[in-house]
Image: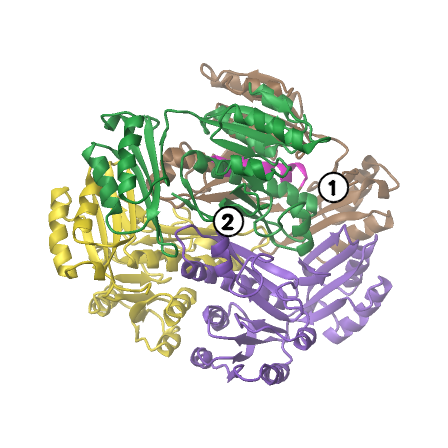
Chain colours: A yellow, B green, C purple, D brown
Amino acid sequence: MPDSRQYVITFGCPDRTGIVARISSFLAEAGGWIVEAAYHTDPDTGWFFTRQVVRADSLPFDVDELRARFAGVARSLGAESDWRVDDTGERRRIVVLVSKEGHCLYDLLGRVASGELDVDVRAVIGNHEVLADITRAHGIPFHHVSFAEDKASAFAEVAKLVDEHDPHAVVLARFMQILPPELCEAWAGRAINIHHSFLPSFIGARPYHQAYQRGVKLVGATCHYVTADLDAGPIIEQDVIRVDHGDSVADMVRKGRDIEKVTLARGLRWHLEGRVLVHGNRTVVL
Amino acid sequence: MPDSRQYVITFGCPDRTGIVARISSFLAEAGGWIVEAAYHTDPDTGWFFTRQVVRADSLPFDVDELRARFAGVARSLGAESDWRVDDTGERRRIVVLVSKEGHCLYDLLGRVASGELDVDVRAVIGNHEVLADITRAHGIPFHHVSFAEDKASAFAEVAKLVDEHDPHAVVLARFMQILPPELCEAWAGRAINIHHSFLPSFIGARPYHQAYQRGVKLVGATCHYVTADLDAGPIIEQDVIRVDHGDSVADMVRKGRDIEKVTLARGLRWHLEGRVLVHGNRTVVL
Amino acid sequence: MPDSRQYVITFGCPDRTGIVARISSFLAEAGGWIVEAAYHTDPDTGWFFTRQVVRADSLPFDVDELRARFAGVARSLGAESDWRVDDTGERRRIVVLVSKEGHCLYDLLGRVASGELDVDVRAVIGNHEVLADITRAHGIPFHHVSFAEDKASAFAEVAKLVDEHDPHAVVLARFMQILPPELCEAWAGRAINIHHSFLPSFIGARPYHQAYQRGVKLVGATCHYVTADLDAGPIIEQDVIRVDHGDSVADMVRKGRDIEKVTLARGLRWHLEGRVLVHGNRTVVL
Amino acid sequence: MPDSRQYVITFGCPDRTGIVARISSFLAEAGGWIVEAAYHTDPDTGWFFTRQVVRADSLPFDVDELRARFAGVARSLGAESDWRVDDTGERRRIVVLVSKEGHCLYDLLGRVASGELDVDVRAVIGNHEVLADITRAHGIPFHHVSFAEDKASAFAEVAKLVDEHDPHAVVLARFMQILPPELCEAWAGRAINIHHSFLPSFIGARPYHQAYQRGVKLVGATCHYVTADLDAGPIIEQDVIRVDHGDSVADMVRKGRDIEKVTLARGLRWHLEGRVLVHGNRTVVL
């Protein structure tokens, strides 16, 4: 029952009166049963955002027809391209990029195995082979791409392996390699990274070492969209955990893992559910 | 600018298609500029909730006319009485009941003094006189009502002192006296208590002592509506703070105060902003 | 380097002057290099607790000799039996009991696989077979014991499978079966459960359903020692996560899992490191 | 009973074997009853730290004699100057510097009034007069020093007003003025600031505006010792609170206040209890 097919409409346009009325009347006239609806207006930029979830079986037409009809609504509200209709009947596909650290991958695989995260993990790609066995134990293909020699050709191979699946998300699960600008662009709004600090603190390499040196009393994790600007993309979710003077760098690394994995999992879930709308360098999570 | 006059509509009815369209069309036709809108549907009870904030100056009529016209909308949706239109132009009035512990009162008075909490504290009533001076230093009347002799007549006096202000909230800021059933009823949905535990743990007296005995690793605070059933009313907000084996009961009391006061302040703010809709024994905070 | 062999002394006795001097002088005279030391005095019960970690290579004798000599110190301080010397050179052994829910098991296995949790998982025992494959993928034996027919004989079989490993901890990782009193006694101080609520709230079955009904704003998890009194044993660690009116029971279950697994992992780590001293029904975590 | 007079020894020296034995034997031989003891060794710098709380009435001599005798112990352990013996019989004195924002001052005054924070607030100094009335209502002198014209002479006046009290702490409770280097030095280890961000993020002016621009999902507060390097002094305590896309800068400011005041209060308490040992740019809180 709770997992019946749904259409998820996300939409943004300049704010003005009557937007909600226009959209909700359109849906009401078609008999659409709204399961979940959220709205947000950004007073600074004067931008309006909404996410609406409609039961597929409440509409007398299919998703393509919904898209075609909603395009007219969007046009009338001045939103040429800033909208989308997703069909939960199409299972989300993801590809995961990893290195040696496995806690985020283990966590994702566990969620998928239990059915908590209903996605199709098409492939895991690693620049080391450490995580091959656990990946394959879950029946998922693992590809090893060495970055030791030529990073450019390695990234080309990764891109090829990723793009053949046309994934809804490319998850950098502690991948530790900086994506080249052309991949940041190609995967804009789909490449999701987990950074092991509370950004914007401790950008770049070895953030726990930086945190230790600064003597902070909490360490954090940040799930964000990847952009060409290192660790500066729109933030989807963040969390922190308490540390103290008794914690070595290794302790911080260990404690930090527990928030890295849950922060990534939350951010990824929201992304795949179409909850995350990017506006400038900020996100609206509806 | 951000504090211009607004009308706040809160509304609940059995869920069905077209409710949002009906309400938003009504507002759009009147030219209403929606500043904030939130919706929730409870799948268990099939109940729909919404809160809409409209700029007063966007409507061509006053709040009485809005109420009159919205009554028709509500009726057409099957919500005879489960709705309200508040006018932020009418300043919220509160009366605070206290005993000896002052941290919640100090906190509220500080928020009011700084303008953060824009309410009219009409009176503070205490069953001890300890907090009279600080209250009066803020220019607010303090009434001492002794509960040492006859509780019934004491409560009658409290009721008289409260009711003459017809307050939007009666705040039990660590009042430590159990309201009699008739006052629970008279102030239903307006009497707000802060209980010094994470309810439903440690109901009743000396919750920190109970928490210490049980050896919990977090202590909590709960802001809830008062009902005749002790500490069992609808919960508005809760929070916790970490304790450990080194904390005595006195330490727990001290640490707990810091969450009591902020939890009460958050719950009270939401109540006064019309964000809290009670449904059965649960709250929807929009 | 940081993982060189260590001896961990834990000790409790009635408080009086000179205890620290007695213990630390004993260690200093033997040349013991103290890596970590923690003390606690419970003012209510007048009990003194300490945990001392000594580098093995700083002592001119082995762990048996340390135990023999420390016995004299303990006796002189009135602590006949309330002390222990653990040798980190002896790898900790655990057995895990599971049912169908896999998030805690996945989490533990991931920690073990990465080396974060350096324990020997001797066996996983399940009353269902759902988690057999993932267990075996980690090279760990999985035993299925059916509880469908005769619980008493099922528990006898579980006990046999557990006891042959003489484990330092028996981990009930969402086992969902209530241990019979004789096993509670046999495994006293070693059987560790994760309960999916912030105890003492919502004892027993379906705590998330209870939490939903009560309308709490945070859900919790509690890691505790198992005693014959259901969900009432000494608490090792607790944590909470925020929920709101939009969360169904299923959402609470999902969010709660993320704190169940980390709370269990923290509690288990502390137990295995000899940090948890039980005193009455409370724990001291040093 | 719990507030009987105590001597608080804080001590740091290069780590080696026998330090605890030396100190605890010294105390034991004098009959010292240790109420609280904490130790920490920093493995990176090889430094040892301890804090010991002794009941004054358990020693056969006064605090001056304790200092004289302990000096010998400290010398024998190679700690010429890195130690201190505080007498809780001498009430802590503080001076508070404020500007217009009153939440931290209100909070401190409330704690002092209730007896929770047992300190002698000798004076409040403000560069505006907004907070004069509430200060005086608590019976505390308020001094207005204008910074509008000549900052150098204003700071000279502040220094004079502060130094006449020889305070144990100079509390910058949202003072909003940058201390000149000579005052940073004069008050080194005593000047405590609350910065309204999770440092090292958002150093300097308008941190909530910076946080809003960056789109973070949590805002923070940092209590730290003031040094000549802006917002870069040793951190005593930090905390965070969740924000989301719906929060304007003004909302962040409001929510942030609730953690600023409790973070400052915690840090100040620890400082006054002699719990905070500074080592390089990090703190050890025992």
Count of all numbered marks drawn on residues in the image: 2
Q: Is residue C286 left or right of residue B223?
A: right
Quadrant containing the C terminus of chain B in the rendered view: top left
Classed neighbour count for the residue bearing mark 2: other residues with Cα under 10 Å, few (<14), some (14–19), many (≥20):
many
Residue named by callout 2: A218
Pointer 2 indicates a residue of which chain? A
Task: Please tell me the numbered disc located at residue A157.
Answer: none
In the rendered image, residue C7 lying in the magenta stretch gets the answer no
Report the front residue among A159 and D215: D215
Q: Which residues are magenta?
A: D257-274
Q: Secondary structure at mark 1?
A: strand
Q: Are marks 1 and 2 in contact (CB under 8 Å)?
A: no
Q: Is residue D187 visible?
A: no
Report the front residue among B151 and A83: B151
Q: Is residue C151 visible?
A: yes
Does label 2 lie on the same chain as label 1?
A: no
Classify A102 as above or below B87. below
Q: Position of residue D271 (x, y in %)?
A: 63, 38
Q: Position of residue D106 (x, y in %)?
A: 56, 28
In the rendered image, residue D270 lying in the magenta stretch gets the answer yes
Classify C274 as above or below B4. below
Instruction: Name the amino acid type tagged 2.
Output: Leu
